[in-house]
Amino acid sequence: MENREEYDDEINLLDYLNVIKKRKNLIVIIVVVCVVIAVIYSLLATRIYQSKAVIMPVAQQSEQGGMSAIAAQFGLSTPSTSNVSELINLLKSNILMERVIKKNDLLSVFFKKEELKNIPDDIKTWKGIRTLKGVFSVNDNKREGIIELSAEFKDPKIAKDIINYMLTELTNYMSSEAKRVAETNRKYLETLIDKNADPLIRQKIYSLIAKQIEISMMAEVKENFAFKVIDPPKVPDRRIKPKRTQTVILAFIISLFAGIFIAFFMEYVENVKKRGRDSKT
């Protein structure tokens, strides 16, 4: 009985091989056509380059916690030290991207003049934001405590410039926000000096004012205020897309299976028609 089953399996396998052999020309044509199309596509497709950068949030100073506790006694809001989630949210925010687009005229980089003709400014801005989100990406590397930035574009220099634009605007935004909060706190603290006669309280107020001035000065310097650039962006020298070899190999495998499937399907249709003719006779 086992020999019978093995014999049937051999016959079935032989039938499959006969079908492939019978339709080999069709399979070869399908594979060749698909591979040629894949090669032409990979040669004509727009080359995309990727620039990368790595940043790390500036560590919180140990004395900041004590000053924050004292500031809280007076109902002050303190500029929050930068952290990974804050930086990522800002880098992904529409407001930061809108500023980058307008300051650096990225609409003219992303689109041709004809594409933006007779389009309202707010719609242009949204088109630019959506395009920038497709070009620029942020990755949170939790294990290393760093943030990885990347930009993909057909022009390698622009890919690098986009990352620099985002980092510059991020620094400007965070420093201006820190200065705004520090200035507001300083003015409020100055109004409290005349209202408090207690020398100890006045001393604390003066310390807080000095701290707000220090924060404002640090924000004015900007460099390494909110984050450090561990690995700055560079102009890439190699494309990341299209991946020609991978595309051709994938096209070969898919077309081979497709050709074999079509061959068996055609054989099945042919057998059905043959049985139909035999039943009529």
Image: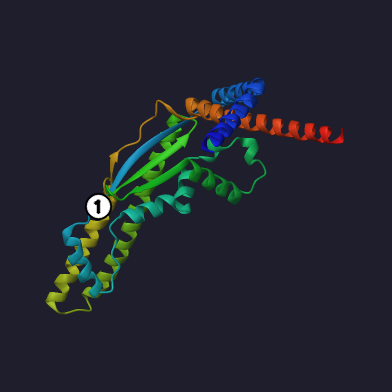
Residue at which label 1 appears: 218
Q: Position of residue 225 (x, y in %)?
A: 27, 50
Q: How is the image coloured?
A: rainbow
Q: Which amino acid type is shown beneath numbered disc 1?
A: Met
| Secondary structure beneath label 1 | helix
Residue visible at 27% across and 65% down? 186
Q: Residue at the far right: name it.
A: 281
Q: Is residue 218 above or below residue 3?
A: below
x, y (%) of residue 39?
56, 23
Between 238 and 59, the one nearer to me in the picture? 238
Q: Is residue 172 above or below residue 68?
A: above
Work out which quarter of the rendered image holds the C terminus and state it.
top right
Q: Is residue 29 visible?
A: no
Please say if 209 is above or below 121: below
Percent across and percent down for residue 109 are 53, 36
The quadrant where residue 16 appears: top right
Using residue 258 as the reference point, say whether residue 132 is left or right of it: left
Within 10 angstroms of label 1, few (less than 14), some, or many (20 or more) residues? Answer: some
